[in-house]
């Protein structure tokens, strides 16, 4: 237990029980709130790719080669294409 926490507990012990309960309730609510907001669940990688792809207009997708990686060397290095 940290020194600051020990001091806080000692100060709380001096208060009436009704005030102790109120402060304890606030502390517990704060802890619960922090736990629920600590780490947002990250989207899967494939879902991010789908979202990016959805932003590209259909006309742009139609400009892409339909053989995908089969003629990769042709697109990258200018080699003859495979038919």
Image (tube, grey):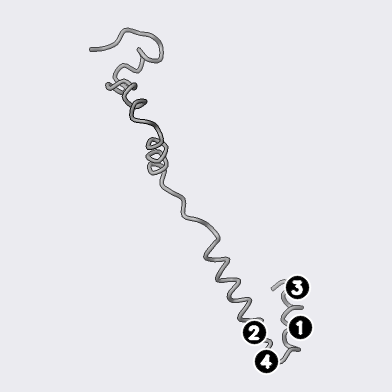
Would you say the residues marked 2 and 1 are in contact, meaning their CB atoms lie under 8 Å apart?
Answer: no
Residue at figure coordinates x 75%, y 83% from the top left: 10
79 in relation to 42, above or below? above
9 in relation to 64, above or below? below
Quadrant in which the N terminus appears: bottom right
78 in relation to 17, above or below? above
Could you say which is closer to the camera, residue 54 or residue 20? 54
User: For residue 17, which numbered disc appears in the image?
Assistant: 4
How far apart are labels 3 and 4 at the CA level?
Answer: 21 Å
The earlier-in-sequence mark between 1 and 3 is: 3
How far apart are labels 2 and 4 at the CA level?
Answer: 9 Å
**Comparing marks 2 and 4, which lies closer to the viewer?**
2
On screen, residue 8 versus residue 43, left or right, reads right
7 in relation to 14, above or below? above
Q: Which residue is mark 3?
A: 4
**Comparing marks 3 and 4, which lies closer to the viewer?**
4
Residue at figure coordinates x 37%, y 15% from the top left: 75
Q: Using the rendered view, name the quadrant where residue 18 is placed.
A: bottom right
């Amino acid at each position: 237990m940290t020194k600051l926490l020990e001091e806080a507990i000692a100060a709380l012990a001096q208060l009436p029980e009704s005030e102790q309960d109120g402060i304890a309730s606030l502390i517990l609510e704060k802890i619960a709130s922090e736990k629920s907001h600590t780490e947002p669940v990250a989207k899967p990688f494939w879902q991010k790719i789908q979202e990016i792809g959805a932003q590209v207009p259909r006309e742009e997708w139609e400009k892409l080669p339909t053989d995908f990686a089969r003629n990769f060397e042709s697109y990258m290095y200018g080699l003859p294409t495979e038919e």
